[in-house]
Amino acid sequence: MDRKEITISNREDIINFVNSNPVSRKGFLIVLVALGGIFLDAYDFASLGIGADQIVAEFNLSPSGLGALTAVMAVGALLGALFGGIFTDKLGRNKMFLIDLVLLVVAAAGAALSPNMGTLIFFRFLLGVGVGLDVPVALSFIAEISNTKNKGRLVNLWQPMWYLAASFTGAVLLPFHFLGIEEHLWRYAVGFGAILALIVLFLRYKYMEESPMWAAKNLPLLDAAKIVEKTYNVKVTILESKEKVSKKDERVALSTIFSKKYRGRTLLASIITSTQSLEYFSVGFYIPVISVMIFGKGIIYAILGTLLFNFFGILGGLAQSYLTGKVGIRKLALIGYVIVIIALITVGLTGNSAPTFLMTLLIAGFIFGHSFGPGSQGMTMATLSYPTELRGIGSGWGQTMTRVGSIIGFFIFPILLASIGLSNTMLVISAAPILGLLVVLLNKWDPTGKDLDNDNGSDFSIDQFKDQNINIKI
């Protein structure tokens, strides 16, 4: 069958084509390959969580020692996200895809083979740098091959992918358990991440091209046209044009996303990403530990609890992705925050006396609400709130704030759990989603369905508080 033919004469023609045309079947497969980095991110975090008890026993860790070990990966991810967003805007999405995956392969293998705590901390830090580099480029890439109508829905697929990976971690370890191989099980889990990273690296190298939007703004028009042809399976004819589309020499500064036009968006994305991360990595990461407390001692309960609770994360993630275009990113965040707050406070007030069924239902509700709302919408808000030339920086900043929340959550949860118990810990953690809910109520920015590459308007800025009263509406 003959391919569809399109004509272009300048970079705006490519951007308009991408924004008005749905991804092809091949394009959707490319989206899934791009999401492979999200899968690795979740797998690498969850694999350590399942083996937390074994690691504590093997290295004789205190609660603060366990918190430091888990937080160090988030520190690496923070640095990777902060600088990765800048470099992905400069070097392109595809180059960064390959660079960070090589790092993930080496770091996962090194962590699995670590003979002592110092070596393990070093490779967990490198692993964090790798995932911190990958997430901003993956979400930026997906946004830049999706049309305006479906950007939010496709970018939001990262959340069910996360929970699918977390569930997969438990599924990987089940055969080892039933074969009676439980000693050093955490090493098998972490090491398998290197094999997964190699698979994703191969798929990206073989099937992925550069982002057509990034190419349109940074490469010669002929090269950008070839990328559009391969990605969308169309034939592109270039009309004569006086405009020269070439890579710009000037760099876009990180400070741009804090300018008057963008600071409201940046503030909103920062609060959602940091609060959702704090709540998740205080609770969601320690699902194996919580499962043992609910169902009984033994790694089998940690594995089964991981599978059970993350199933609700998959459901919430798929539901919000389907509803993104209909409901909007902001309202989904609001609904999710409310569900999370109810679950955390109820656990906090009834946890010590709650029956197993109720406790299970509340933790499942927390995971569903988090995945449905702020867990998904924070990074999607950060990715879709800026035009192409700022998207890597904006998404990278969102990941940076995500890692700030995760560092706090990783470190404080085991300490709080050991000192004040599960119920009181949940009450303390509920402060994070309450803060997020209040900020989202005040800030009405929502990028759903907006064409940011042709955006000359302004949005909510904190300066508005000086000039007018804000009517709070959901």
Image: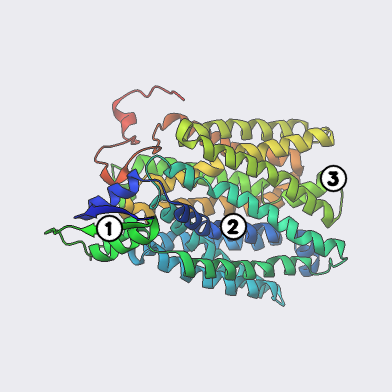
Which badge, 3 or 1, comes first in the chain's sequence? 1
Going from the N terminus, do you reach mark 2 or mark 3 first? Answer: 2
Residue 337: image location, x then y, percent: 57, 34
Residue 18: percent from the left, percent from the top?
34, 49
Label 2 amino acid? Answer: Phe
Q: Which mark is residue 422?
A: none
Q: How is the image coloured?
A: rainbow
Q: Which residue is mark 2?
A: 39
Front-most of 454 and 392? 454
At horizontal 68% and vertical 68% (from top left) the residue drawn is: 192
Residue drawn at point x = 60 percent, y = 51 percent: 162
Query: In front: mark 2 or mark 1?
Result: 1
Task: Find disc 3 in the rendering and name its residue.
Answer: 295
Q: Amino acid at mark 1?
A: Val
Q: CA distance from mark 3 to mark 1?
A: 60 Å
Q: Quadrant of residue 218?
A: bottom left
Question: Image point 28% across, 42% down: which residue?
Answer: 260
Q: Is disc 2 placed on a helix, strand or loop?
A: helix
CB of mark 2 within 8 Å of CB of mark 3? no
Quarter assignment of residue 124: bottom right
Task: Say few, some or many: other residues with alpha carbon within 10 Å of mark 1 (under 14 / 14 to 19 / 20 or more).
Answer: many
Alpha carbon separation for disc pair 2 and 3:
27 Å
Instruction: Confirm whether residue 400 shows in the render.
Output: no
